[in-house]
């Protein structure tokens, strides 16, 4: 096995991409590209997609979500929740081992025990570590003894108040299980020397160039046929920061996988109805699935002056005043679904388009509302300024041109993404383009954007509605899923009525995969999972 690894590394590190002069046909190596750099391989900093995707291959969590976002066992083979919803007790598998590494005695990875889980969770709330995931636990866990490991096979998580999403949170990459030996051995450089229990183990990282993972021969999970996972020999991640170059690399089969859409090449891949162009059918596979990301235009309630956006009927008119379906068809080749049923996206179990009716395209209704607000055909309405970044200029231009037909004048102001986020945080952006990607698979995560006691982020609109707040707090205490879903839907209807946002679309993932690849899972969290992938 070691000889194979050395050969594998030599091939990958000598060649920046597949080299037709080098025979690698005996190795199944999955190649993908990250436009954004990986900043850390320490799970405590799994804050962005590029970090999360690699960390998901190297580490394991207590539980995992299946493709329907239902909780499944992982390092924990079972668990129980107390009747009051405060205590979660997990039973740890006895066949999970850390990767072989210099940090261990004889360089052999040892068995995972409950104390490792306790240590890993404690790192997330340790101020000296400074994890970007600490907010997921702060305010929810018991202040005296939040984590306990009474024996090697039992881990106990204690909450200060019921918080139903907590079980799903335990499957986030922040809560990957790490060994204390590795953190102590590598210190600050643990970020570049990760040691986990995942299907693939770390081998090499040349920052901003390439990252190499190889098969973990001791991985604990098996496939449906009982064969030990993973099937691949390894993974190579490239870091080409130009999307068009990455697209060309996929076209010439230097990459096995391409994720997302870019306006410069979307028409080369897809027809306007969201299906592959005929000439691509024998070259690639295309997978589209709901992605838990809601795109919207936010309207701050902390508006100074006499902005027309202060008037509810104006906000409602803007929601009726543009064609979401046409926007998606023309600009995104039908990847995405019109946001016509509130803020929570398709893919969550609480989503119900029949119970939550939002805004559709109705220019007559929009004109009626503008007239009722005192602005017939937009007359007398001052110009509105909309802040966005260059990536969404085409989308905002489409919307504002349709609003012009109603007599509403909107000026687009382009800002750098970091500048826009800072303005949103400080309440300096009255009207802004934004999105919210799921942190954990529960609608509470989306409703938190409108809870008045939350700061910005997440409450960038400064929404403040006492009835909404009361329902939100009631939902936090409710352990019955169906009753909680009903509360979420009541909250959605308040958001629709008050219109602190312009609902745009519910996102979908767009994944283009080489024809010889099978077993690549798709899911609403857009998590890349490669342990079941095969290459023909």
Image (spheres, helix red, strand yellow):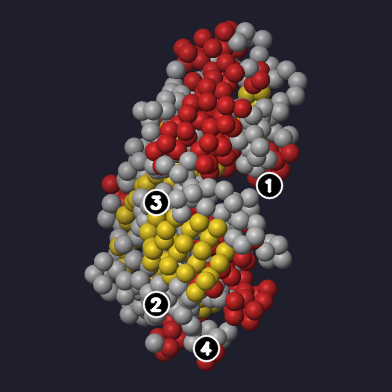
Q: Is residue 480 visible?
A: yes
Element type where label 3 sits in the image: loop
Counting from the top left corner in percent of width and height, residue 333 is at 40, 39
Circle number at residue 418: 1
Judging by the rendered image, the residue that carries numbered circle 2 is: 95
Element type where label 4 sits in the image: helix
Residue 375 location, quadrant? top right
Q: CA distance from mark 2 to mark 3?
A: 25 Å
What residue sits 52% from the left and 88% below the top?
Answer: 107
Counting from the top left corner in percent of width and height, residue 18 is at 43, 72
Judging by the rendered image, the residue that carries numbered circle 4 is: 107
Counting from the top left corner in percent of width and height, residue 468 is at 56, 29
Q: Residue furthest bottom?
A: 106
Residue 218 location, quadrant? bottom left
| Mark closer to the observer (1, 4) | 4
Q: Is residue 20 visible?
A: no
Contact? badges 2 and 3 (CB < 8 Å):
no
Q: Residues within 10 Å of mark 2 (few under 14, many from 20)?
A: few
Circle number at residue 252: none
Q: CA distance from mark 4 to mark 2?
A: 18 Å
Element type where label 2 sits in the image: loop
Q: Is residue 423 left or right of residue 432?
A: right
Element type where label 1 sits in the image: helix
Query: Where does the N terminus fall, quadrant-wise?
Result: bottom left
Judging by the rendered image, the residue that carries numbered circle 3 is: 69
Q: CA distance from mark 1 to mark 2?
A: 45 Å
Counting from the top left corner in percent of width and height, residue 433 is at 60, 36
What residue sits 24% from the left and 70% below the top?
Answer: 225
Q: Is residue 385 left or right of residue 352?
A: right
**Which sits earlier in the primary sequence, circle 3 or circle 4?**
3
């Amino acid at each position: 096995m070691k000889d194979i690894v050395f050969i594998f590394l030599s091939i990958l590190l000598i060649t920046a991409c597949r080299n037709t002069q080098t025979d690698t046909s005996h190795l199944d190596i999955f190649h993908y590209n990250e436009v954004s750099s990986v900043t850390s391989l320490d799970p405590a900093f799994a804050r962005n997609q590029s970090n999360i995707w690699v960390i998901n291959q190297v580490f394991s969590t207590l539980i995992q979500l299946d493709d329907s976002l239902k909780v499944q066992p992982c390092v924990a083979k079972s668990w129980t929740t107390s009747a009051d919803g405060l205590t979660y007790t997990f039973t740890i598998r006895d066949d999970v081992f850390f990767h072989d590494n210099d940090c261990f005695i004889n360089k052999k990875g040892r068995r995972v025990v409950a104390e490792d889980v306790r240590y890993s969770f404690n790192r997330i709330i340790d101020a000296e570590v400074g994890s970007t995931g600490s907010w997921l636990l702060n305010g929810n866990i018991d202040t005296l003894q939040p984590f306990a490991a009474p024996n090697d096979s039992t881990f106990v998580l204690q909450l200060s108040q019921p918080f139903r999403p907590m079980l799903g949170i335990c499957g986030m990459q922040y809560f990957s299980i790490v060994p204390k030996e590795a953190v102590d051995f590598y210190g600050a450089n643990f970020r570049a020397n990760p040691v986990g229990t995942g299907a693939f183990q770390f081998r090499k990282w040349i920052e901003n160039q390439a990252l190499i993972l190889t098969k973990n021969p001791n991985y604990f999970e098996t496939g449906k046929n009982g064969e030990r996972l993973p099937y691949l020999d390894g993974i190579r991640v490239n870091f080409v920061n130009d999307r068009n170059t990455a697209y060309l690399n996929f076209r010439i089969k230097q990459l096995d996988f391409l994720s997302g859409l870019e306006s410069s090449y979307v028409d080369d891949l897809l027809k306007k109805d969201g299906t592959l162009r005929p000439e691509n059918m024998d070259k690639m596979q295309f997978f589209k699935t709901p992605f838990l990301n809601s795109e919207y235009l936010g309207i701050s309630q902390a508006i100074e002056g006499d902005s027309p956006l202060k008037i509810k009927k104006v906000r409602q008119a803007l929601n009726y005043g543009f064609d979401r379906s046409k926007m998606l068809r023309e600009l995104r080749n039908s990847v995405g679904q019109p946001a016509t049923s509130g803020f929570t996206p398709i893919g969550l179990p609480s989503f119900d388009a029949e119970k939550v009716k939002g805004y559709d395209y109705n220019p007559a209704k929009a004109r009626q509302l503008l007239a009722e607000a005192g602005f017939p055909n937009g007359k007398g309405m001052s110009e509105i300024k909309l802040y966005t970044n260059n990536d969404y200029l085409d989308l905002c231009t489409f919307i504002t041109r349709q609003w012009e037909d109603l007599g509403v004048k909107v000026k687009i102001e382009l800002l750098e993404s970091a500048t826009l986020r800072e303005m949103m945080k400080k309440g300096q952006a009255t009207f802004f383009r934004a999105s919210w990607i799921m942190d954990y698979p529960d609608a509470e995560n989306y409703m938190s954007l409108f809870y008045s006691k939350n700061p910005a982020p997440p409450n960038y609109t400064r929404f403040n509605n006492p009835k909404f707040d009361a329902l939100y707090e009631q939902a936090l205490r409710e352990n019955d899923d169906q009753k909680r879903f009903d509360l979420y839907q009541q909250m959605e209807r308040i958001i629709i009525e008050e219109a602190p946002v312009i609902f745009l679309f519910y996102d979908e993932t767009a994944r283009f995969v080489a024809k010889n690849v099978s077993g690549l899972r798709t899911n609403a969290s857009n998590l890349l999972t490669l342990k079941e992938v095969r290459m023909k």
